[in-house]
Image: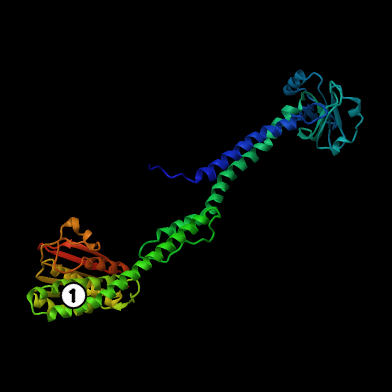
Amino acid sequence: MSGKSPSLKWPLIVQPLLLQFTILFISFPIMVALATRVDSGGPYADETITPIIAQAIEREGDGRLVVRMTQDLAELHAEAPNLWFMAEDDAGQRVNFGPVPAQYAASVGLMRDLSYGHLRGRFAPHSLSSVVRREDSLAGPLTIVGHGKLTRLGFTVIVASSLAALPIFMVMVLVSLVAIPWIVRRSLAGVARIAREAEQVDAGRRGMRLSEEQVPEEIAPLVRAINDALGRLDEGYERQRRFIASAAHELRTPIAILRIKIDAAQDAPTRSLGSDIERLANLAEQMLDVQRLDSSIHHAELDLASLVRRVAGELAPLLIATQCSIEVTVDGALPIRGDGGAIERVVANLVQNAIHHGGRHVIVRVFGRTFEVEDDGPGIPSDARERVFEPFYRLQPRLSGGGLGLHLVKQVVEHHGGQVSLLGAPGGGTIARVAFPSV
């Protein structure tokens, strides 16, 4: 049953964020509740009265301070009939309003040195509770001590806590939204790196291992298990490679003995086995060629045109003997980099494959870092042009060949970083195109 793979974002990012937000939401009211239970010693005097008082104080021509009954002051007095206050300037001039308690009235000259404070009376009706503020007025800077409406601690603490805690709460939320995903991505950077390394693992790049550096401790056992599995695969491949190479080498001797005996035989039935022996010999050599790909690729700069001409010259006598012909054309050939012997086998295999598929005339074209082998045979069906590169796949039974020729071609070309493809020729045959990368 297939399904979407679970993401690490939920357990590593979303869940911690939800937990942190839940803790913050729960902690905030708890902190406020605890603050409101603190013994305050009595109610607070409302501090909003001092700006109203400051706007109602003026200075007479002789410098005395007077209180003018403004509309705001009248409304404040109506709301708090027991309103009283004292205002004093920096020169010691003072003006009083309402029933100022004797304890405050005696504090002459003290107020100018104060700027902020709350005083609370111990006993009801808490007439000694007052607020001290430094305010600007029409008469200049004043220190005002006043008593009006009373405010309980609970409301004051809630408002003050909200104003102080809300910015902190928002900053913590923003930091969490940014910091937690960044921390998680940084912590999982090693996982992303080994994922990219794992994408590079394939059959043609054996010996690779995933790096265990900067991998989280929880992921490290998985990385080590994968590396151990890659090591076992490499060992298994090496054993298989050695077995095939040894088998191909061992087959050479009995094949050579059989070839000698068949060539020396006098009767026709025995001599007719020569084609089967050639097929066995060719198969053994192709198996060895596949094994050589892992160890004998020695790259050097090559003249592609000269290499193709040399292979065509070596094959020409064999083609003429079978009443076939070969032609080489060169147009702006460029140098390539690779193993000369391996690329020669590619050219030879493609030419021989063209003849085996019924071609009587083979054209080899060289242009740039590409060469093509075209034949005039019946061609290869389009749905089989990829499958013919599979090992031991053949379009039809033949008297010679083991089905490894085109597979070997593809392996060699890909080891050189190139591409090989089969196309239909205009005359009905097949074009095998091999393109090599830039030097």
Q: Position of residue 182 (x, y in %)?
A: 54, 50
- Residue 351 visible? The answer is no
49 or 254: which is nearer to us? 254
Query: Quick check: 291 above or below 177?
Result: below
- Residue 174 visible? The answer is yes
292 or 368: which is nearer to us? 292
Residue assigned mark 1: 330
Residue displayed at 67% across by 32% down: 29
Residue displayed at 41% across by 66% down: 235
Q: Position of residue 386 (x, y in %)?
A: 23, 59
Q: Position of residue 351 (x, y in %)?
A: 17, 71
Q: Position of residue 233 (x, y in %)?
A: 40, 62
For residue 252, side relative to residue 262 (left or right): right
Quick one: quadrant of the C terminus? bottom left
378 or 164: which is nearer to us? 378
The amino acid at mark 1 is Val
For residue 146, side relative to residue 214 (left or right): right
